[in-house]
């Protein structure tokens, strides 16, 4: 309910009038010649929510021209008070965005209260401690046990998660550091093959090359592979799923070589992508026992399921 455009008492500068354009104050000010309302202005009706008070001047008894002038002054004063009340009330209810000098309407003190949209933060809680005896492969929905004497690698390549023996030694071939044991878990990529047997038989050559022939940057830590023989292969249950593994004994130009095993099985989560777990254990003295491979396979579990196990001799039928 905005007052119409016109000259009104300036709330920021007493004794002056300021032009109200109907929605905001302008920079036009003037000193009023007399306490009179703008020419042709019709006093608006009092609006709900604005208290107005009309002060009437006493009219001398007996009337006469003096009485007429007194009544005129009283009416003009009452009109000015009414207009000032309306304008001041309206300005209080809106920001003075139209004032280039940034003058603002009168403000009232308020008590700070919490906003309805504000929420109290819950006390910070620490994340559950990670189990040092379990490697969690969230991507493939499985967990692998950490064998005694092994550790979880802090730095991994891509989506490949790694268990490794903690100690390193100087590689017998090209300069570098080697470990006596390594286990990796990753998703099979670059193939649509769904047969665990075909996938394991195809992957074993790549696994051997990466472990004992030539690494990812062209070095030959063991002087290259000289020969190999398959020592074991077969169907195995892995976390309630049917998998297949292939194990090779690898001989190298330098050093004692070792054992490499590829294990393939479908994940029990999502689209059941094929999972590849690779095992590498040196044949040198002091290396982990080959039984660690079987312990890891037997201990693979679906994430959140501590009961469904696997291993040679167990049912290889997928869980319901």
Image: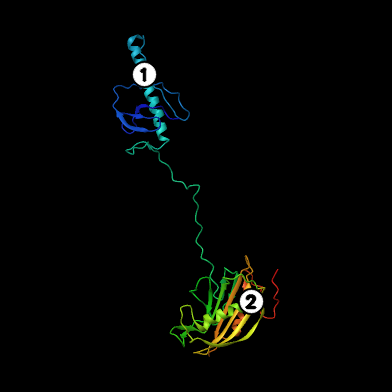
Measured as percent of width and height from the top left, residue 311 is found at 66, 79
Residue depicted at x 39% and y 31%:
88
Q: Nearer the viewer, residue 253 or 116?
A: 253
Tell me if I can see residue 208 in this picture.
yes
Q: Secondary structure at mark 2?
A: helix
Q: Nearer the viewer, residue 191 or 289?
A: 191
Q: How many marks?
A: 2
Q: Quadrant of residue 53?
A: top left
Of mark 1 and mark 2, the one earlier in the sequence is 1
What's the CA distance linking mark 1 and mark 2? 107 Å
Q: Nearer the viewer, residue 193 or 186?
A: 193
- Residue 35 in which image quadrant: top left
Q: Which quadrant holds the C terminus?
A: bottom right
Q: Is residue 15 visible?
A: no
Mark 1 or 2, which is nearer the eye? 2
Question: Label 1: which residue?
Answer: 74
Q: Is residue 276 left or right of residue 93?
A: right
């Amino acid at each position: 309910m905005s007052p119409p455009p016109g000259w009104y008492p300036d709330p920021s500068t007493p004794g002056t009038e300021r032009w109200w354009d109907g929605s905001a104050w302008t920079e036009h000010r003037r000193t009023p010649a007399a306490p009179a309302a703008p020419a042709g202005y019709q006093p608006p009706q009092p609006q709900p929510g604005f208290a107005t008070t009309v002060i009437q001047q006493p009219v001398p008894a007996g009337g006469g021209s003096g009485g007429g002038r007194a009544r005129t002054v009283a009416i003009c004063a009452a009109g000015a008070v009414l207009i000032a009340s309306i304008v001041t009330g309206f300005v209080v209810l809106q920001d003075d965005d139209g004032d280039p000098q940034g003058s603002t309407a009168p403000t009232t003190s308020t008590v700070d209260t919490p906003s309805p949209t504000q929420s109290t933060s819950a006390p910070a809680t620490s994340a559950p401690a990670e189990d040092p005896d379990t490697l969690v492969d969230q991507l493939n929905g499985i967990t692998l046990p950490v064998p005694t004497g092994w550790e979880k690698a802090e730095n991994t390549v891509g989506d490949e998660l790694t268990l490794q023996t903690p100690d390193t030694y100087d590689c017998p071939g090209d300069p570098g550091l080697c470990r006596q044991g390594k286990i990796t878990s990753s998703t099979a990529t670059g193939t649509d093959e769904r047969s665990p047997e075909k996938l394991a038989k195809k992957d074993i050559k790549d696994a051997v090359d990466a472990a004992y022939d030539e690494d990812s940057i062209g070095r030959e830590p063991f002087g290259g592979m000289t020969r190999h023989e398959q020592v074991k292969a077969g169907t195995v249950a892995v976390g309630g799923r049917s998998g297949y593994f292939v194990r090779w004994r690898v001989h190298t130009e330098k050093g004692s070589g070792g054992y490499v095993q590829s294990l393939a099985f479908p994940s029990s989560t999502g689209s059941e992508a094929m999972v590849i777990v690779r095992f590498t254990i040196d044949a040198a003295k002091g290396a982990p026992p080959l039984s660690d491979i079987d312990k890891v396979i037997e201990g693979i579990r679906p994430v959140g399921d501590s009961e469904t196990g696997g291993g040679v001799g167990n049912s290889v039928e997928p869980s319901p």
